[in-house]
């Protein structure tokens, strides 16, 4: 499973990229606002930090203006994935861009039928929002299972990118279902490394090692 980080904070991206475990980055207009930085400039910097896909979202709602914005975004770097909303105009834009060889991430997906449409439009990634789905009392992970089943039934190449991940259980369930990618905030990715028994074990081993009086090398 690929790991993307959902942030426009370049300090966090650099730190996670240094682990060698980061496969890409997703941003959205809210994350760009949170960064306090100019959109095109921050996307360009992120594209220089990671080799994998970097999602940058259009903000227009009509196809023609989406295409104009996408033109600007895809020129930033080869690893830009243009992010479009799951609307008729968004999918029309997706079809046109992917036919042309540009990666597209279709975002704000909340139903398996929407995911089916995105796959038919040739989306590179579909982003179902599990956290926001859970927030309204629905089953976010059930949505991922349904999309996995449908994509496998028809051999769609569109990658399932689990978005709006809020905690490590979302990551675990995504991996069990066989999602292709998950994108999570930096804090959730850091949580994945942690286990209290790992910390306790290190503490015990180091205490005994100190008592042994030995060194390595
Ligand atoms: O980038 C899209 C998605 O991951 C947003 O997550 O936490 O704002 O629902 P969240």
Image (spheres, grey):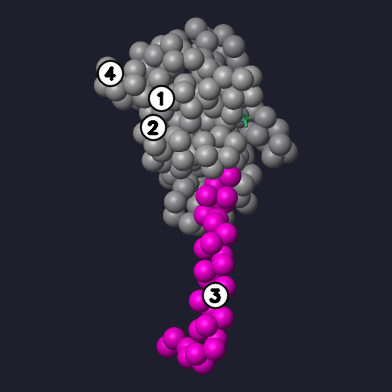
CB within 8 Å, label 2 to label 1:
yes
Q: Is residue 20 left or right of residue 196?
A: left
Residue 208 lies in magenta, yes or no?
yes
Quadrant of the frame with the N terminus: top left
Q: CA distance from mark 2 to mark 4?
A: 15 Å
Q: Nearer the viewer, residue 117 or 78?
A: 117
> Image point 57% across, 51% down: which residue?
190
**Vertical side of 24 occupied by 60: above or below:** above
SS for callout 2:
helix
Residue marked by disc 3: 204
Q: Quadrant of residue 156?
A: top left
Residue 3 lies in magenta, yes or no?
no
Dot in front, 3 or 1: 3
Q: Quadrant of ligand 1?
A: top right
Within 10 angstroms of label 2, few (less than 14), some, or many (20 or more) residues? some
> Image point 56% across, 34% down: which residue?
165
SS for callout 1:
helix
Q: Is residue 99 left or right of residue 161?
A: left
Q: Which residues are magenta?
A: 188-217
Where is residue 20? Give x, y as percent: 44, 54
Q: Nearer the viewer, residue 191 or 137?
A: 137
Residue marked by disc 2: 177
First in residue order: circle 2 vs circle 4: 4
Residue marked by disc 4: 153
First in residue order: circle 3 vs circle 1: 1
> Image point 64% across, 28% down: which residue?
29
Quadrant of the frame with the C terminus: bottom left
């Amino acid at each position: 499973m690929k790991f993307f980080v959902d942030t426009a904070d370049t300090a966090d991206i650099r730190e996670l990229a240094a682990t060698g475990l980061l496969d890409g980055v997703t941003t959205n207009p809210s994350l760009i606002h949170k960064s306090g930085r100019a959109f095109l400039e921050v996307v360009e910097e992120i594209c220089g930090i990671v080799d994998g896909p970097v999602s940058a979202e259009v903000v227009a709602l009509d196809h023609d203006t989406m295409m104009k914005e996408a033109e600007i975004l895809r020129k930033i770097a080869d690893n830009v994935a243009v992010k479009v909303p799951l609307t008729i105009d968004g999918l029309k834009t997706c079809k046109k861009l992917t036919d042309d060889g540009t990666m597209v991430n279709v975002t704000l997906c909340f139903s398996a039928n929407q995911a089916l449409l995105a796959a038919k439009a040739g989306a590179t990634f579909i982003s179902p929002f599990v956290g926001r789905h859970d927030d309204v009392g629905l089953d976010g992970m059930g949505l991922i299972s349904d999309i996995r089943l449908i994509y496998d039934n028809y051999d769609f190449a569109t990658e399932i990118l689990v978005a709006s991940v809020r905690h490590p259980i979302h990551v675990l369930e995504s991996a069990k279902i066989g999602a292709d990618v998950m994108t999570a905030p930096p804090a959730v990715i850091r949580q994945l490394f942690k286990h209290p028994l790992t910390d306790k074990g290190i503490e015990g081993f180091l205490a005994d090692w100190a008592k042994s009086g030995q060194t390595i090398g």
